[in-house]
Image (cartoon, rainbow, N blue to C red):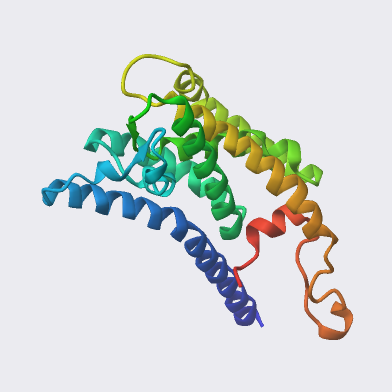
Amino acid sequence: MSQSHKSGDEDSLGAIGVDVAKRLASPLIMLAVMWLIRISDFVIPIRFNGAGLRSWDFSHWYGIFTMPFLHSSWPHLLANSLPFLVLGGLVVADGVARFWAVTGIVMVTSAVGTFFLNEPGTVTVGASGLVFGYFGYLAVAAFFARTWSGRITRGIISLVVIGVYGSAMLFGVLPRLGHISWQAHLFGLIGGVCAAWVILKWGGNRKSQRPRAGSTGATSGTTTGTGDPELDAILRNLD
């Protein structure tokens, strides 16, 4: 009897571990691509940064998608790697699909703002727009949670994120001279806030209206979750 309980606990822990690994794979793969490109740029005598976002050059439209993966130097990549992984990991806790939705929205808004507000011909590279976008998403997510437990959980995460990264984010969006693209930072942040509003408020409401699979649990003998949509979104296994 005790062995069966122990086996069940181990299976549950194993399932959670697999779920966490699946979720973290998305930001880890993105970060790995950034590092592989930087290594290739260092080894091969080719400047990949030319494929970044070139302001007011509509023939370089693909820079919207290449900009976050390119970096001008090793210090540039190192400065973005840890916050990208930390904040991206917190975003992907909501689910892989939601992570990619946030990433897509932030990627587009950051690029559009940079494209039109920077000087014509300026090439912009770096993942900092995504970093600011993830920060914006996490900072306001508590306002769009549908349950009190979700608001409390997200509120704690928001306070921690703001406490750790808030000052850097504030100074990062202020216009200043130099080679730092405040445009990418500002519009990445705006994109993250918009993503939270669109995905958590509107997308979440539509999702909550759909009947849950296994709702007739009396006949199937299965459970559908904890009853807390926010907690279920974090703990459920990926299909």
Residue 138 shows up from this direction: no
Residue closer to the observer: 214 or 131: 131
In percent of width and height, residue 130 lies at 47, 40
Where is the N terminus found, in terms of image quarters? bottom right
Left or right of 36 on screen, residue 161 = right
Left or right of 113 on screen, residue 205 = right
Residue 115 shows up from this direction: yes
Which residue sits at x=46%, y=26%? Answer: 183
In percent of width and height, residue 106 lies at 54, 42
Residue closer to the observer: 116 or 130: 116
Which residue sits at x=66%, y=42%? Answer: 196
Residue closer to the observer: 62 or 144: 62
Q: Is residue 66 above or below residue 226?
A: above
Q: Is residue 54 above or below residue 180?
A: below
Q: Is residue 102 above or below residue 29?
A: above
In percent of width and height, residue 209 lies at 85, 60
Q: Is residue 177 above or below residue 233?
A: above
Left or right of 177 on screen, residue 158 = right
Which residue sits at x=64%, y=56%? Answer: 234
Left or right of 117 on screen, residue 71 = left
Which residue sits at x=33%, y=42%? Answer: 52
In percent of width and height, residue 59 lies at 38, 45
Number of marks in the image?
0
Where is the C terminus found, in terms of image quarters? bottom right
